[in-house]
Image (cartoon, helix red, strand yellow):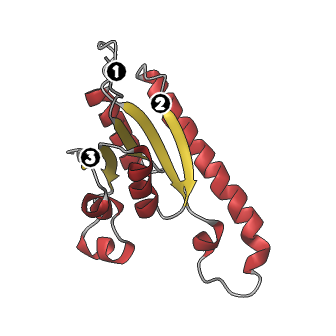
Amino acid sequence: MATAEKPVMVVGIDDSEQSVYALEWALDHFFTPFAPNFPFTLIVLHAKPSSTSAIGLAGPGAADVLPYVEADLKKIASGVIGKAKQICLSKSVNEATLEVVEGDPRNVLCEAVEKHHASMLVVGSHGYGAIKRAVLGSVSDYCAHHAHCSVIIVKKPKIKH
């Protein structure tokens, strides 16, 4: 009898505390250290913006700063993935695949779902209001409507004073 592969869970992460919380939430709820076999194959994915999109429509001389912007974006991506790896290890999840893919997070996450045949996508919610969401766009909203799998949008609880 052939063994069935585990379903794949993709967790999107960036340098925000909301996405870090979403990763921790997913690990706490689906990757408990008490179970010998985790129910999912875990892929933690960071979408790195391209250097040209990061500087936008800069004027003359923009080409001169591209190498510096690219180096900074790579450093940020390395830090995000390093932090994700530490979080996984601290929760006894040693077999996570950590990926950095260049592009818009909305597209990168939906494409990763397709590429890995994921059955679940976990993303954090930044908690933007209607105006900010309309201007900036919502990665979680886009993924909820376009990803071909179940999408969990994790909201970090507000601290009551």
> Residue at 30% of width from left, 20% of height from top?
32
> Residue at 46% of width from left, 58% of height from top?
108
The residue type indicated by label 3 comes to: Val
Name the secondary structure under disc 3.
Answer: strand
x, y percent for residue 53? 58, 72
x, y percent for residue 100? 56, 48
- Given residues 24 and 143, the one toward you in this image is 143
Residue at the extreme front: 1
Calculate the distance from the C-alpha at mark 3 to the C-alpha at mark 2.
19 Å
The residue type indicated by label 1 comes to: Thr
x, y percent for residue 81? 55, 41
The answer to whether residue 15 is left or right of residue 120 is right
Calculate the distance from the C-alpha at mark 3 to the C-alpha at mark 1.
32 Å
Calculate the distance from the C-alpha at mark 1 to the C-alpha at mark 2.
20 Å
* Image quarter of residue 117: top left
Q: Give the residue number, with chain letter if any, for mark 2.
A: 96
The answer to whether residue 129 is left or right of residue 123 is left
> Considering the image in quadrants, where does the N terminus appear?
top left
Q: Nearer the viewer, mark 3 or mark 2?
A: 2
* Image quarter of residue 3: top left
Q: Nearer the viewer, mark 3 or mark 1?
A: 1
Say if 6 sits above or below 71 in the image.
above
> Residue at 36% of width from left, 34% of height from top?
24
Q: Give the residue number, with chain letter if any, for mark 3.
A: 154
Q: Give the residue number, with chain letter if any, for mark 1.
A: 3
Say if 7 sits above or below 135 in the image.
above
